[in-house]
Image: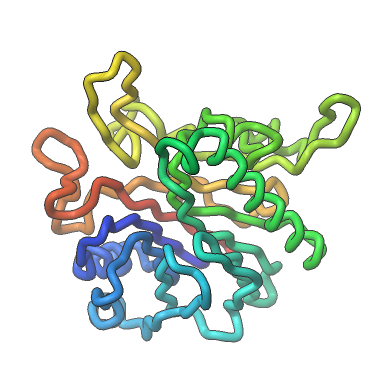
């Protein structure tokens, strides 16, 4: 199994809690967004897990920091840009997979409008499709801070990630739109973790405001899964974490403690590869 941890650390030095989660969840791959360059994580990770974690350098990728205990021949860079990296995980005899890591632009006026977010999502989805064509399969998983909620057009539109909330819909793999075959479909399992029906954080990011339209809880940090890789994705392992086993990342009000940790909560999941 390959265990992956993603966390937007918001510039904080969270080496100790990251190491704690890695030890608790037997993590193999740590993906951090908004890490400051002078914050090192390898020492605490190695001490806590007993694994030789090293920085997995991705040239040109400015917004992500990856630490790996996976032997180098089993993990390779397929393509990268400043906000994303597509990796190939090849651990025979298991089928290889593509793992796309990303931290997409935040919301805002002008260049970071909702339309632009959809455009950026479309561009990344096209690059993923290109690599799927090159490798001859669509065993692909996307993880990262997408800075969109699951219902936004950049996520759901066929011109964006084309990510749906039901596996049976994603199992179609594509659909007909205006008599043409659409872009491939992703299943977005994070839908099942949104809300407070079960005792866990109702999202990964919280922002209160005085506007008329305010969701408060958001699910900007997401995992997208192609139907072809479904048999290798352990859906029960996907969790929003609020503790490293010792420290709690939420305040007494059950909101992300952004003063000490981050305004985002981390995600973890496992792949059978």
Measuring 34% from the left and 24% from the top, which residue is drawn there? 215
Q: Is residue 60 above or below residue 169?
A: below
Q: Is residue 73 left or right of residue 8?
A: right
Measuring 24% from the left and 77% from the top, which residue is drawn there? 38
Q: Tell me residue 29's x, y (percent).
A: 44, 69
Q: Tell me residue 78's x, y (percent).
A: 65, 72
**Which picture quadrant has residue 80?**
bottom right
**Which picture quadrant has residue 138?**
bottom right
Q: Is residue 159 left or right of residue 50?
A: right
Furthest toward the left, the residue is: 252
Measuring 35% from the left and 56% from the top, which residue is drawn there? 7
Furthest toward the right, the residue is: 179
Quadrant for the C terminus in the image: bottom right
Furthest toward the top, the residue is: 212
Q: Tell me residue 98's x, y (percent).
A: 64, 63
Q: Nearer the viewer, residue 270 or 103?
A: 103
Q: Is residue 104 left or right of residue 48?
A: right
Measuring 61% from the left and 48% from the top, which residue is drawn there? 225
Q: Tell me residue 147's x, y (percent).
A: 43, 43
Count the marks: how many?
0
Q: Nearer the viewer, residue 224 or 216?
A: 216
Q: Is residue 226 above or below residue 77?
A: above
Q: Is residue 165 left or right of residue 94?
A: left
């Amino acid at each position: 199994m390959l265990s992956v941890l993603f966390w937007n650390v918001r510039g904080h030095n969270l080496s100790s809690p990251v190491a704690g989660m890695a030890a608790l969840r037997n993590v193999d791959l740590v993906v951090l967004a908004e890490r400051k360059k002078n914050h090192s994580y390898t020492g605490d990770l190695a001490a806590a897990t007993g694994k030789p974690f090293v920085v997995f350098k991705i040239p040109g990728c400015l917004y992500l920091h990856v630490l790996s205990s996976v032997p180098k021949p089993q993990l390779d860079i397929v393509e990268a840009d400043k906000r994303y990296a597509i990796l190939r995980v090849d651990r025979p005899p298991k089928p290889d997979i593509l793992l796309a890591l990303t931290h997409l632009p935040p919301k805002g006026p002008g260049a970071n409008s909702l339309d632009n977010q959809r455009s950026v999502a479309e561009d990344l989805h096209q690059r993923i499709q290109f690599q799927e064509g090159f490798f001859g399969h669509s065993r692909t998983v996307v993880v990262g801070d997408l800075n969109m909620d699951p219902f936004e057009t950049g996520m759901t539109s066929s011109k964006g990630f084309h990510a749906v909330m039901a596996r049976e819909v994603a199992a179609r793999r594509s659909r007909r739109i205006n008599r043409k075959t659409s872009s491939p479909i992703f299943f977005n399992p994070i839908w099942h973790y949104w809300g407070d029906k079960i005792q866990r954080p109702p999202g990964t990011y919280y922002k209160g405001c005085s506007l008329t339209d305010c969701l408060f809880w958001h699910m900007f940090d997401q995992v997208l899964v192609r139907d072809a890789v479904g048999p290798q994705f352990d859906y029960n392992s996907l969790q929003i974490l609020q503790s490293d086993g010792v420290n709690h990342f939420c305040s007494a009000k059950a909101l992300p403690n952004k003063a000490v940790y981050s305004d985002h909560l981390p995600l973890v999941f496992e792949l059978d590869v």
